[in-house]
Amino acid sequence: MSSPASDVARHLGENAEAVCRRYLSNGRREGHYWMVGDVRNTPGRSLYVRLSSSGDGGAAGKWTDAASGDHGDLLDIIAASCGHAGFRETLDEARRFLSLPPSLEGPRNPAPSKAQRGSPESARRLLAATKPLRGSLGEAYLAGRLITDFHAGDPVRFHPHCFYRPSSDDAPRGRRAWPAIIAAVTDLAGTVTGVHRTWLDPETKDKAPVAYPRRAMGHLLGNGVRFGASGVVMAAGEGLETILSLRQVMPTLPMIAGLSGAHLAAIAFPERLKRLYVARDDDPAGDTALAKLGERASECGIEACPLEPRHGDFNGDLRALGRSAMAASLRGQLMSADRMEYL
């Protein structure tokens, strides 16, 4: 039989996004998760809260802090953000929250939806509406960042008119659709679980003038944008452009983009993997992601080797150094066998 506390936690999970907006107000929604710094509502992206249940066993309201490894449910979030001294206070606060007006509960008889917003099915439908990257504004944008070489089967495509949902940081009457680069997020089995979108401005051929020109949707935890088949040696990085930049000088090395520092730290390891090069960003989030990923890799018997950029990230290196000098910088960071194989 369920306990009163588990019943309250379940009801909180059914209203996970509303709970996060109240008690983790310094965070924001990214795809299927709410991202914030920690349980005390510090700004940042280390802690992620699942906003809906998934087929892989993840329950709505469950959270993980990629920096500390802590995890829990929404009762823990309420306790930490309110500074409660005892569990009774937390239960009372949660019950008060759940008795808020029905306007936060959604319509009593909602019309059936073809695909829940932010779900893997919604991501797959968006991906199905895309076009090849070649000859598109997306290709022109990446060429401006010196990313020009692509390969058959790369999971990067283009959508000429992708809906953008404004945030509170956007202009109230801003444009609602922009061209976008769409990258497929997949799990270890190759199933599409989400997409990453980079909205573009056709006039400047740069990122669209919106508050958040990059967003991901779907089930991201453990998954990523994958280039090449999984192997014994791979590389992983945070950003899509970081990985695409590395592919310009190491095109045959399998790679995965985690899409954020927290998600990079949580990527699932392929069974055959023995050595993982971590293309870190040169910032505190990159430090945290590298430390956490290295710890997880060590526990699985995988050697984690950092790749250090000279100009903040590897797209910065590509643009500042060019391919030859960037390859020379990487050569000293690779194992000798990998230098022969991939450079």
Image: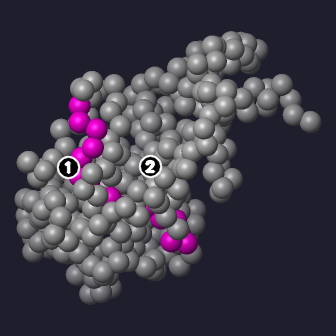
* Residue 271 higher or lower than 290, as above or below: below
Which residues lie in the magenta part? 174-190
Q: Residue at x 9, y 74 (%)?
A: 324
Q: For this rendering, which residue is in front, 21 or 119?
A: 119
Q: Give, as a three-letter code, the residue at label 1.
A: Leu
The magenta stretch spans residue 200: no
Q: Are the residues at dot 1 and dot 2 in contact (C-beta closer than 8 Å)?
A: no
Q: Residue at x 40, y 73 (%)?
A: 234
Q: Residue furthest right?
A: 1
Q: Residue at x 45, y 36 (%)?
A: 29
Q: Which mark is residue 231?
A: none
Mark closest to the chain's N terminus, 1 or 2: 1
Q: Which mark is residue 217?
A: 2
Instruction: State the separation of the CA atoms marked 1 and 2.
Output: 17 Å
Name the spot of residue 74 as percent of width and height, x first.
64, 30
Name the spot of residue 154 as percent of width and height, x first.
33, 73
Q: Secondary structure at mark 2?
A: strand
* Residue 277 higher or lower than 46, as above or below: below
Q: Is residue 91 left or right of residue 317?
A: right
Q: Give, as a three-letter code, the residue at label 2.
A: Met
Q: For this rendering, which residue is in front, 198 or 254?
A: 198
Q: Secondary structure at mark 1?
A: strand
Q: Which mark is residue 200?
A: 1
